[in-house]
Image (spheres, rainbow, N blue to C red):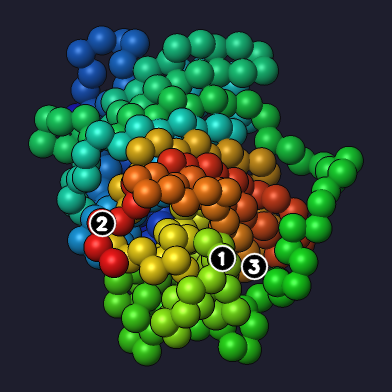
């Protein structure tokens, strides 16, 4: 017998208002041992880049499973949240039904370690080692001005991910959120070459923004939202992620999230990409660092 554990949306209108909530909605499955948690979930086709499930979405969905497991097995640590995720992508799942297996490796008063595997058709395709801890809930003692000249909301010349923008035809995530690219950094759109850096704005739909857990998982997803920055150097196509680390610092304030991405080095086989996510107040909400392979097509 299954039990709904997280998002319980009551109507079709609510479903349309909270599409990322569906990604985070889990159903508990029977487990072979009490040390192993099993959950069923579903990733809709809108959470894809091209025909591949978006990596950040899989990290966030796995975080939802790990969070549910921690709250169920250690309710005294229910105020902890996934503050770090180290993810290995072993394969590329198709959108649709998936399962998650989670296991606690350490449970402490300040830190808990939980492993989560995303499984499809009996095969583990994504494995994430989560560190749980307490989110920052106060103003930072020091904060650099990361936003600089990037406004808190899309600028008038921002390019919305829609049918008029080629990115909107590829990045289906924009069907479940509002996304706009900063053209001043995205020089590849006009056939120019520039530094390997990109900026964009992203905002969840109202229902997702109102749910404090879903909005936090959405921020984790947003830390993998930038297109591959080597596009500004003329490298186009799928850039497979070798490994990605994601940090969640605090819950986002309502409003647009700003994503700033750049690379320190673009090689002939690999490149690194850092992404920083700021909320409407300018606070750092999430960050990621990944090593990826250079697209082979040009």
Q: Earlier in the sequence, mark 2 or mark 1?
A: 1
Crowd class of label 3 (few under 14; some 14 to 19; many from 20; radius 10 Å): some
**In this picture, residue 201 sits left or right of residue 104:** right
Instruction: Name the element at disc 1.
Output: loop
State which mark lies toward you, 3 or 2: 2
- The residue sitting at 49% across, 45% down in the picture is 272
For marks 3 and 2, give the CA distance.
37 Å
Q: Residue 21, can we see it?
A: yes
For marks 2 and 1, give the CA distance.
19 Å
Residue 21 versus residue 107 in the image, above or below = below
| Res. 296 mark | 2
Crowd class of label 2 (few under 14; some 14 to 19; many from 20; radius 10 Å): few
Image location of residue 182, percent across then percent down: 57, 76
Image location of residue 185, percent across then percent down: 57, 73
Instruction: Name the element at disc 3.
Output: loop
Image location of residue 218, percent across then percent down: 50, 53
- The residue sitting at 60% across, 60% down in the picture is 260
Quadrant assignment for the N terminus: top left
Q: Residue 28, can we see it?
A: no
Please name whichever residue, 245 or 100, is drawn nearer the observer in this view of the structure.
Answer: 245
**Circle 1 sits on which residue?**
195
Q: Earlier in the sequence, mark 3 or mark 1?
A: 1
The outermost residue toward the left is 121
Residue 261 versus residue 93 in the image, above or below = below
Which of the 4 image quadrants contains residue 102? top left
**Circle 3 sits on which residue?**
255
For marks 3 and 1, give the CA distance.
28 Å
**In this picture, residue 51 sits left or right of residue 18:** left
Crowd class of label 1 (few under 14; some 14 to 19; many from 20; radius 10 Å): some
**In this picture, residue 4 sits left or right of residue 181:** left
């Amino acid at each position: 017998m299954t039990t709904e554990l997280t998002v319980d949306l009551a109507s079709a209108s609510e479903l349309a208002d909270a599409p990322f909530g569906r990604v985070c909605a889990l159903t508990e499955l029977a487990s072979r041992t009490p040390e192993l948690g099993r959950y069923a979930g579903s990733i809709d086709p809108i959470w894809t880049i091209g025909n591949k499930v978006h990596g950040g979405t899989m990290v966030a969905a796995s975080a939802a499973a790990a969070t549910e497991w921690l709250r169920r097995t250690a309710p005294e640590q229910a105020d902890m949240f996934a503050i770090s995720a180290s993810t290995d992508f072993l394969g590329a799942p198709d959108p649709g039904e998936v399962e998650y297996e989670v296991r606690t490796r350490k449970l402490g008063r300040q830190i808990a370690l939980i492993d989560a595997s995303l499984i499809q058709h009996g095969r583990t395709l994504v494995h994430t080692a989560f560190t749980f801890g307490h989110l920052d809930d106060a103003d930072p003692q020091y904060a650099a001005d990361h936003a600089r000249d990037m406004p808190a909301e899309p600028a008038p010349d921002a390019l919305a991910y829609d049918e008029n923008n080629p990115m909107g035809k590829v990045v289906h995530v924009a069907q479940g959120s509002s996304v706009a690219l900063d053209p001043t950094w995205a020089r590849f759109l006009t056939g120019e070459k520039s530094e390997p850096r990109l900026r964009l704005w992203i905002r969840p739909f109202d229902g997702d923004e109102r749910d404090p857990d879903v909005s936090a998982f959405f921020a984790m997803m947003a830390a993998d939202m930038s297109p591959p920055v080597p596009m500004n150097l003329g490298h186009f196509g799928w850039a497979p992620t070798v490994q990605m680390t994601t940090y969640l610092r605090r819950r986002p304030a309502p409003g647009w999230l700003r994503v700033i991405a750049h690379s320190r080095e673009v090689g002939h086989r690999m490149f690194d990409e850092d992404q920083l996510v700021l909320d409407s107040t300018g606070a750092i909400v999430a960050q990621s660092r990944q090593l990826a392979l250079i697209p082979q097509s040009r």
